[in-house]
Image (cartoon, rainbow, N blue to C red):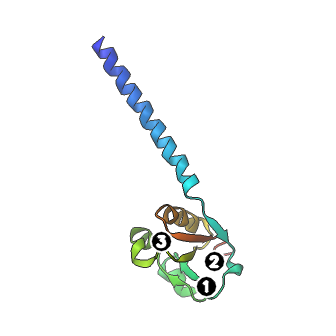
Amino acid sequence: MMIMMIFLMISLMNKMSKIITHFFYYSYYIIGEIMNIYLKDLKPDYNVIDIRDTYSYSLDHYKNAINIPMNILLTYPSRFLNKNSVYYIYCTSGSRSKKTCELLSILGYNVINVVDGFGK
């Protein structure tokens, strides 16, 4: 009987773990909703961040954009971003910038994804 109780408790804890993981996975997308903009709609006075690598940035980039590679920006966001400012983030295609914006949004930063990226 005791073995059966232990087995049931382990089984229940495993199911609870999956439920909690499922909850946080889906609430991440609800909390992390982001706004999008097209590259052609950016204005010169916007805070634009290019999250591509430094080599890609050196080849060509949006005028007035600063280069902060994605891994550095996500590792040290408080070094580069102010929670009271708005930032427009782009990459080559828009997929990495979308993920970056989702994560930064969860951390409380005001970020807007450049949906079409710089490469299109």
The reply to whether the C-beta atoms of the residues labelled 2 and 1 are less than 8 Å apart is: yes
**What residue sits right under mark 2 in the picture?**
118
Write the residue at 61% across / 87% down. 45
Badge 3 marks a residue whose secondary structure is helix
89 sits left or right of 36 in the view: left
- Graded by Cα atoms within 10 Å as few (under 14), some (14 to 19) or many (20 or more), the crowding at tag 2 reads some
Write the residue at 55% across / 47% down. 26
Q: Amino acid at mark 3?
A: Met
Q: Nearer the viewer, residue 105 or 10?
A: 105
Q: Taking 113 as reference, is 39 above or below it?
A: below
Q: Quadrant of the N terminus?
A: top left
- Graded by Cα atoms within 10 Å as few (under 14), some (14 to 19) or many (20 or more), the crowding at tag 3 reads many
**What residue sits right under mark 1 in the picture?**
62
User: Residue 25 at what x, y percent from top left?
Assistant: 51, 47
Badge 2 marks a residue whose secondary structure is loop
Q: Taking 65 as reference, is 74 above or below it?
A: above
Write the residue at 49% across / 47% down. 24
- Graded by Cα atoms within 10 Å as few (under 14), some (14 to 19) or many (20 or more), the crowding at tag 1 reads some
The reply to whether the C-beta atoms of the residues labelled 3 and 1 are less than 8 Å apart is: no
